[in-house]
Image: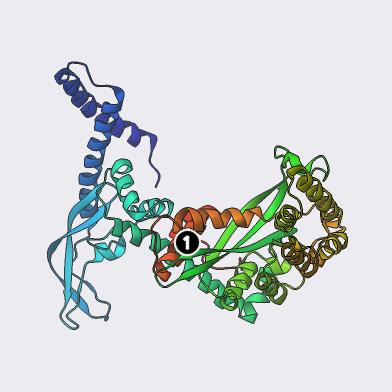
């Protein structure tokens, strides 16, 4: 909504005059004891009341009274009266009156103003709902209600905030469902307009999962992220990797888009394929997946994107060596020396040397179990551990992007102390939080970018 400079200036002058008089009166009553904080708070309350009353008048002036209108049944609906309505807005509860029409044929009443402005009487307005949803995806619903009182000067129930947060998640779920349907239709996939889009030169994908508490049981929230990678000279990798392992090229994930769901792997595969098609993963010059060693993850990748370059996350790989060192040596310096040697072999793509070293410990009673586990893990992912080649190609070899997403979605929001979710509630709040982290909030709440392909 645009405003002319003259209109804004006139409105500001009028409001400032009124507020200045009120502030002067308050200061005199308080004997000059008011500070700017009290003045600011008072002005907020006054401006909110002005907005509440003004919005009610705007709604009423927007009502167009006619003797009759066309009913949905295609018959005539006659004007009967003006009826009262209420909507909960960013200014509080706004009361207004609008025209009511009744169709004698189908006996259906209608209020054209509510329909035209998309008002749900007695409900939260379209302007307030996204703000409440933002609070609801950041913290518990009851705490979000307290924050709404402080930040928005509104008394809102925790249930209203729950509904707002879930509303965003439901919109994202519907959006993803549409992508799934369209990505299975051949004429969409082969449409020439889709292939006119510039495909990404190098697109990354990462998948991970985290357990979240539902009332029935703990369920795995699977999280997928698509992203690109650019050099970031300001970023430095941990110093422990510099002396013996070399310094990794500083790389930064950008344009990150998260998608998640409480699903089994077979169902999650549909989300992987559909979102991949949406981001033109099937057309990317290079498609690279960086993930941990979970078998279900690599199975989904191989089934849906067999052309993708597969990289085992470096940090997950080296984590398997620590239990071996701890079981093998009591002294920390000996543990550190052995770890450094094994990490260096991995770093230089001498993975088979590490496997052989671990297998040689099979008869060592203390280190047998962790060594066998490490050797099996490395053997299963041998083709994904050519770190020398990956570094030469400039590939990112860490899956921290998706791990960060799991922590921000699952750990920080869904696994709060005492939380027990209904499955749908957890799904929708997780999806809403993923939307926020992906930077697509405005698109989702406004139904922008509804189609998966620019065609």
Q: Is residue 372 visible?
A: yes
Horizontal side of residue 126 vs 331, given as left or right: left
Residue 220 place in picture, x, y as percent: 53, 68
Quadrant housing residue 40: top left
Depth check, front residue: 87 or 379? 379
Does residue 375 sit above or below 433 in this rendering? Answer: below
Residue 382 position, x and y percent, is 81, 66
* Residue 63 drawn at (x, y percent): 22, 58
Vertical arrangement, residue 130 with respect to residue 249, above or below: below
Relative to 133, say whether 177 is above or below.
below
User: What x and y, as percent, mark residue 275?
Assistant: 60, 68
| Residue 125 in view | no
The answer to whether 204 appears left or right of 454 in the picture is: right
Asked which quadrant contains residue 33, the reply is: top left
Left/right placement of residue 369 relative to residue 108 reads: right
Question: Does 7 sit above or below residue 194?
Answer: above
Secondary structure under badge 1? helix
Residue shown at the point (25%, 66%) measured from the top left: 112
Q: How is the image coloured?
A: rainbow
Q: Among all residues in the image, which is located at the extreme left?
A: 81
Quadrant where the image shows the C terminus: bottom right
**Numbered-mark total:** 1
* Residue hosting label 1: 430
Q: Quadrant of residue 370?
A: bottom right
- Relative side of 16 to 351, left or right: left
The residue at the far bottom in this view is: 105
Query: Neighbour class for label 1 at 10 Å: few (<14), some, many (≥20)?
Result: many
Quick one: which residue is furthest to the front in this view? Answer: 365
The residue sitting at 17% across, 70% down in the picture is: 101
């Amino acid at each position: 909504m645009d405003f002319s400079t003259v209109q804004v200036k006139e409105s500001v002058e009028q409001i400032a005059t009124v507020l200045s008089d009120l502030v002067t009166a308050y200061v005199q009553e308080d004997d000059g004891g008011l500070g700017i904080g009290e003045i600011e708070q008072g002005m907020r309350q006054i401006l909110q009341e002005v907005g509440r009353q003004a919005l009610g008048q705007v709604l009423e002036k927007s009502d167009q009274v006619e003797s009759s209108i066309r009913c949905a049944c295609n018959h005539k609906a006659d004007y009967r009266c003006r009826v009262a309505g209420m909507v909960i807005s960013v200014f509080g509860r706004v009361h207004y009156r609008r025209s009511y029409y009744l169709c004698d044929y189908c006996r259906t009443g209608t209020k054209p103003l509510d329909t035209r402005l998309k008002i749900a009487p007695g409900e939260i307005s379209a302007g307030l709902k996204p703000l409440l949803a933002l609070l609801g995806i950041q913290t518990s619903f009851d705490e979000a209600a307290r924050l709404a009182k402080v930040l928005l000067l509104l008394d809102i129930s925790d249930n209203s905030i729950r509904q707002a947060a879930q509303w965003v998640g439901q919109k994202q779920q519907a959006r993803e469902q549409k992508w799934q349907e369209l990505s299975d239709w051949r004429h969409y996939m082969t449409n020439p307009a889709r292939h006119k889009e510039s495909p990404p030169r190098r697109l990354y994908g990462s998948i991970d999962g985290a357990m979240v508490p539902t009332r029935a049981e703990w369920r795995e929230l699977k999280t997928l992220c698509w992203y690109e990678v650019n050099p970031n000279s300001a970023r430095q990798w941990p110093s422990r990797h510099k002396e013996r392992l070399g310094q990794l090229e500083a790389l930064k994930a950008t344009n990150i888009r998260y998608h998640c769901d409480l699903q089994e792997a077979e169902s999650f595969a549909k989300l992987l394929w559909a979102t991949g098609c949406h981001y033109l993963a099937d057309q990317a010059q290079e498609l690279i997946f960086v993930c941990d060693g979970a078998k279900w993850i690599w199975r989904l990748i191989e089934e849906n994107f067999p052309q993708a370059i597969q990289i085992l996350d470096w940090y997950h790989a080296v984590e398997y060596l620590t239990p071996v060192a701890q079981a093998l040596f009591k002294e920390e310096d000996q543990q550190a020396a052995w770890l450094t040697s094994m990490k260096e072999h991995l770093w230089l793509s001498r993975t088979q040397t590490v496997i052989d070293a671990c297998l040689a410990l099979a008869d060592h009673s203390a280190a047998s179990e962790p060594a066998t586990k490490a050797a099996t893990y490395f053997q299963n992912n041998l083709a994904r551990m050519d770190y020398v080649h990956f570094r030469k190609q400039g590939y990112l070899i860490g899956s921290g992007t998706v791990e960060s997403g799991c922590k921000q979605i699952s750990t920080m929001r869904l696994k709060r102390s005492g939380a027990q979710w209904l499955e749908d509630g957890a799904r929708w709040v997780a999806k809403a939080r993923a939307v926020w982290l992906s930077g697509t909030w405005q698109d989702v709440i406004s139904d922008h970018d509804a189609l998966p392909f620019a065609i």
